[in-house]
Amino acid sequence: MKFKRWSWFLAALLLVTFAVSVFAEDNYVVDAKKWKKKGPYTVALCNISVVNSWRVAMVEEFKYEASKHKDIKQVVVTDAANNVAKQIADMEDLITKKVDLIVITAPPTALVPAVEKAVDAGIPVVSFDSVVDSPKVTVKNIADQSEIGEQLAQYIATQLKGKGKVAMLTGIAGTTPGQMRYEGALKVFKKYPGIKVVGQVWTNSAYDQAKRAAENFISANPDLKAIYADGGPSGYGAMQATYEAKRPDIIVVGTGSNGHFNLWKKWRDSGAKVRSFAIQDPPGDSAVALALGMKLLRGQKVQHIEKMKLWTCTDKTLDKVARPDLGDDYINSTFLPEEMKVKLWGKK
């Protein structure tokens, strides 16, 4: 047990160190002349996994963006099924195939040697989402995961006027986004002595796990004032738990899913005073990353570090965001055109 505690501590420390290193890294204009080459191009998405609807949308966003570039002749998409060794092998294969551009979302440290090998072989690498922590990465398209946690927590603190009991449903233990969001939220809550965190559970950002955890927190804390969730399905699970408990007074935040938004709207429109908020990095991160890479291949200026704009949903925008005609796992922040939304998430 002691070994497990120390292993978790070291993993968390490594992730926090990664977060600091990424945002402390100097920014500069990439020397596009080094990467300029004539098309047509073969571009690749090297993906660690497709484990949820956000990542499904992310892959589709990449493909759709590629379809808009007439000088792209081939698109290669790999899926490592959350297996680091498989993703390293995928990178080796892409290097062997001499693709023109690699866009990658991967664990921050494990893929460093493979990514650096690709860059040394003359292949520009654009990293996004879970960003590879190497200065050799050509472009880093970063969504500030700490800011997501901070804004979710700040909404709660503001609504509660700095006082009340809060339960925390965090995402996937050991992942960069999960840890950074958690740390960001704690940073905010620590500013308010009147806020008491009654407990924290890693939910794998899963609806069922989050719903059970929320039900337990509500049962054990009759005076619970808010539930912090930093995932889409987990926020929906928390909202469902408060709905079934007939507790609209409990604030629920999350990164948003269509199920969350539809239930929020349904409950609010029934006359209940429901307070909720969502913020997320859009799955279109992959499309932006590809567009940045294409600029490099065409010899255009690109910053080494590009920061993604985060997407939010508030009570004022809820009516436009909620889509009762689409499935619960629809990602409302997607850039995809309407026909693709219906194809991917339309109710059968």
Image (cartoon, rainbow, N blue to C red):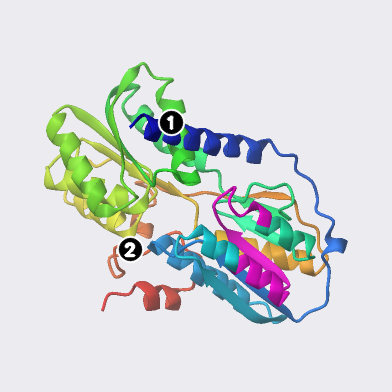
Tag 2 residue: 329
Left or right, residue 218 beside residue 124: left
Which amino acid type is marked by label 1? Trp
Q: Is residue 331 visible?
A: no
Instruction: Specify the farthest residue to the top.
Output: 193
Local SS, label 1: helix
Q: Residue at x 52, y 32 (%)?
A: 13
Label 1–label 2 contact, CB within 8 A: no
Q: Nearer the viewer, residue 284 or 38?
A: 38
Q: Is residue 44 visible?
A: yes
Which amino acid type is marked by label 2? Asp
Asked whether 232 falls inside the magenta stretch, the response is: no
Q: Residue at x 12, y 42 (%)?
A: 246
Instruction: From the top left corner, tell me how far across and down residue 174 is, in percent.
Output: 44, 43
Quadrant location, the N terminus: top left
The correct choice, above or below, for 26 with respect to 286 in the image is above
Asked whether 95 falls inside the magenta stretch, the response is: yes
